[in-house]
Image (cartoon, rainbow, N blue to C red):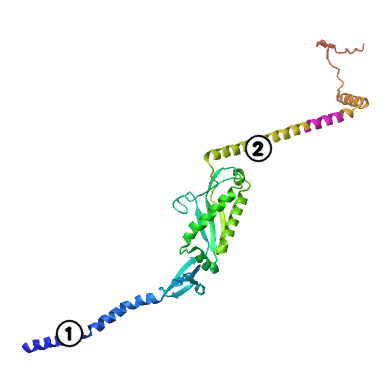
Amino acid sequence: MANVEINLSESTGNLFNKLKGKTKYVVLLLLLLFAIPFIRSLLLTWKLIDPGYTGIKINRLVNKGITREDIVTGFVFYNPVQSVVVTYPTFIQRVAWTHDKTEGKPFNEELTFNTKDSVPVNIDVAVSYQLESVKVPEFYSKFRADNIDSFTHGFLRDTTRNIVANLGSEYTFDEINGTKKEEFLQRTGKMLNDTVHPFGVNIQQFGLIGSLRPPQALLEAVNAKTQAIQKSIQVENEVRSAQAEAKKKIAIAEGEAAANRALASSLDPRLLEWERLKIMREQIAKWNGTMPSVISGSGQGLLMSIPAPQTSVAK
């Protein structure tokens, strides 16, 4: 037993000595296994650019220069130490600037301007725009925005607000709230597009959300004016209806009078005598030969019995 224990101790010692000599190699291998992914991520990585987006590769070392050859979709490989890839959506973007905290940002983003007659007006607007993929490098060079939202709620909103204020001051409140509202919206959308188009941004739509919001006192006055106009129109319609009915009655009366005059002018004494004789002939034709037994007194309303004629008896 003593010999066995001695042999086991010697074998274990020899194995430990062998492993001890190779420990540095094992540690080095483990370090390499963990370091390779880290080194790879420093020297080479990739980014997936989905359809509907455009990516640009930016050189960190040369004043953030842009390599346009990498404006592609799909996988883009690059050195993260030297370069970075920024993606922008090229599908239509929509933004709403309103006073409603449940739409758009959770705070008041309404636009305000003064009309030509110095009426302060608040409006809610919606803007839809789209980036041109071939001009994304120019867009980045101009705004240096890694996130499209910084452009949307920064430059685009400020530009829209300035245009609305400038054009709104050219109209009175009645014009911009009535017949010239569409003209105002079309001019605003066109001017906004002309301003941002050189940067590769195309305005697809510009419009109001809801109605204009003037001061409450003016709004009540406008409502009262509208009601007065509607009442006036109703009264005018009633007057026209009454006039038409009166003209109708006059026309009927004039027609009847003309007919009576025509009938009267057509009667002469001979025609009247002919009608009298015609009536007498009809009465004679209907007489049964019996004499009347009662006759009225002339003008006194008295009735007198007429004795029946006596017939003679032959002797």
Which mark is first along the chain, 2 or 1? 1
Q: The residue tagged with tag 1: helix, strand or loop?
A: helix
Callout 1 touching callout 2 (CB < 8 Å): no
| Residue indicated by mark 2 | 233
- Cα gap from disc 1 to disc 2, whole angstroms: 111 Å
Residue 259 is one of the magenta-drawn residues: yes
Q: Is residue 47 left or right of residue 222?
A: left
Q: Residue at x 63, y 38 (%)?
A: 229
From the viewer's side, name the closer residue of 309 and 239: 239
Q: Magenta stretch: give its range.
A: 251-262
Q: Residue at x 82, y 29 (%)?
A: 257
**Count of picture labels:** 2
Q: Quadrant of residue 296?
A: top right
Amino acid marked by disc 2: Ile
Amino acid marked by disc 1: Phe
| Residue indicated by mark 1 | 16
Residue most toward the left? 2
Q: Residue at x 51, y 68 (%)?
A: 137
Q: Residue at x 19, y 87 (%)?
A: 18
Q: Is residue 17 above or below residue 97?
A: below
Q: Is residue 304 above or below residue 169?
A: above
